[in-house]
Amino acid sequence: MKKFVLLGAVAATGMLSPLSYAVNGVLTSIPIDQPVSIDGKADSIWAKASPVIVKLNELPYKPDNGYEGMEETEVEMRSVYDDENVYFLLRWDDPTHSLERFPWVKQKDGSWKRSLNKDHTKHENTYYEDKLSLFWNISSKGFKKKGCDKSCHMPEDDGLLEGVKDTSAGRHYTSNAGETVDMWHWKAARTNPNNQMDDQYVDHARSESAEWGRHSDDKSGGGYYYNLEEGRDTPVWMNKQASVENTYWVRESDKVPFTDAGFKPGDIIGGHVTGPIEGARADISATGIWHKDGYWTLELKRKLVTKHDNSNTQDVQFGDLSKPYYFGVAVFDNSQINHIQHTKSYKMVFKQ
């Protein structure tokens, strides 16, 4: 892992030594008296916080049609907080800037084709965006010891999971009714264009729910959806103003009905439409930047305590700054569900 750009920028001033890492792998959130600009940049405010290094080197499965993504990386993570919010800065190596998500491509014969290369679990590992997820324990017994593994369940050799035939590469759900885990899910092509991180959670649901225990927090509007329609072999929407920035998505605020005029073979229209999420699902502000020498930086902001109808079961509440909070991290390298993960959990504490 290359040294975090922040270290080189401030080490010469004596503000932070490159060896100033977290003690015993504990992430310590440092109090600050000024807000953090959530722009994905490692501003000098972050020199106050020592990083914890999370090594990721496990994959849940190997796709049957090949996997060209990373099999290991390290996430460098820092945190600061003020009277109202907690902030995070994450950085991880990723040599490829992946923003595709089933994009439409104009063919030589004039037709349009969605780019797909799904594996045996019916998931994508080629034409897909980079992602990062954080799991925070709310009330799952055993999470402190096992971390994300506590809620991850794999089908048996006979393909059955909880007695149900399941072709997935694993499902998330908690072991007991009433237990929940907060899931923060950053998506480079769906939420990052709107400077957000998808606020989701895991509960005890099984096969009666389409996504088993995985759910999104309540929303009042906005979000993302596929740019397709059943029985139609072209995009439904396109951007009114084409731009390099919006190549792989259609912005809700700029969408117009698709027309085929003026496109040439190889041209791309985004595979989804995206707009700002509204409601409890929009609790987390986030901006990620991919750097040309091969790494992401991601800044996050969330209120210490959220106040929605279901906040106590859907969100980790950082209301008691004297107690530890346990979390896990995973990185997705242009993969739909395949991800690089770690075992056990990490601990975060707030410095008083």
Image (cartoon, helix red, strand yellow):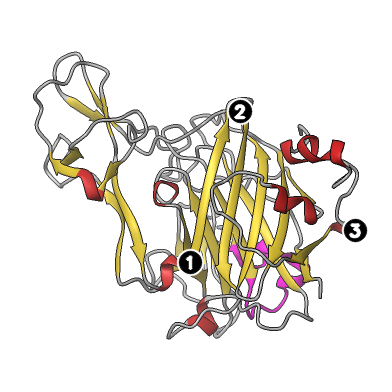
What x and y, as percent, mark residue 224? 31, 54
- The residues tagged by marks 2 and 1 sit, at their Cα atoms, a distance apart of 28 Å
Residue designated by label 3 = 23
Do labels 2 and 1 touch, CB within 8 Å?
no
Q: Residues within 10 Å of mark 1 (few under 14, many from 20)?
A: many
Verify whether residue 317 appears in magenta.
no
Q: Residue at x 77, y 65 (%)?
A: 30
Q: Which mark is residue 15?
A: none
| Mark 2 or mark 1, earlier in chain | 2
Q: Which residues are magenta?
A: 137-152
What x and y, as percent, mark residue 113? 23, 28
Verify whether residue 138 appears in magenta.
yes
Please name the amino acid that badge 3 sits on: Val
In the image, taking residue 98 as reference, residue 349 lies left or right, namely: right
Please name the amino acid that badge 2 sits on: Pro
Query: Does dot 1 land on a helix, a strand or a loop?
Result: strand
In the figure, residue 80 lies in which quadrant? bottom right
Residue 329 in view of the camera: yes
Q: Quadrant of the C terminus?
A: bottom right
Residue designated by label 1 = 200
Q: Residue at x 36, y 62 (%)?
A: 277
Q: Residue at x 42, y 51 (%)?
A: 191
Q: Residue at x 42, y 68 (%)?
A: 281
Q: Which label sits in the foreground, 1 or 3?
A: 3
Residue 156 in view of the camera: no
Query: Does dot 2 land on a helix, a strand or a loop?
Result: loop
- The residues tagged by marks 2 and 3 sit, at their Cα atoms, a distance apart of 29 Å
Above or below, comparing residue 203 to residue 169 in the picture: below
| Mark 2 or mark 3, earlier in chain | 3
Q: Residues within 10 Å of mark 2 (few under 14, many from 20)?
A: some
Residue designated by label 2 = 95
- The residues tagged by marks 1 and 3 sit, at their Cα atoms, a distance apart of 30 Å
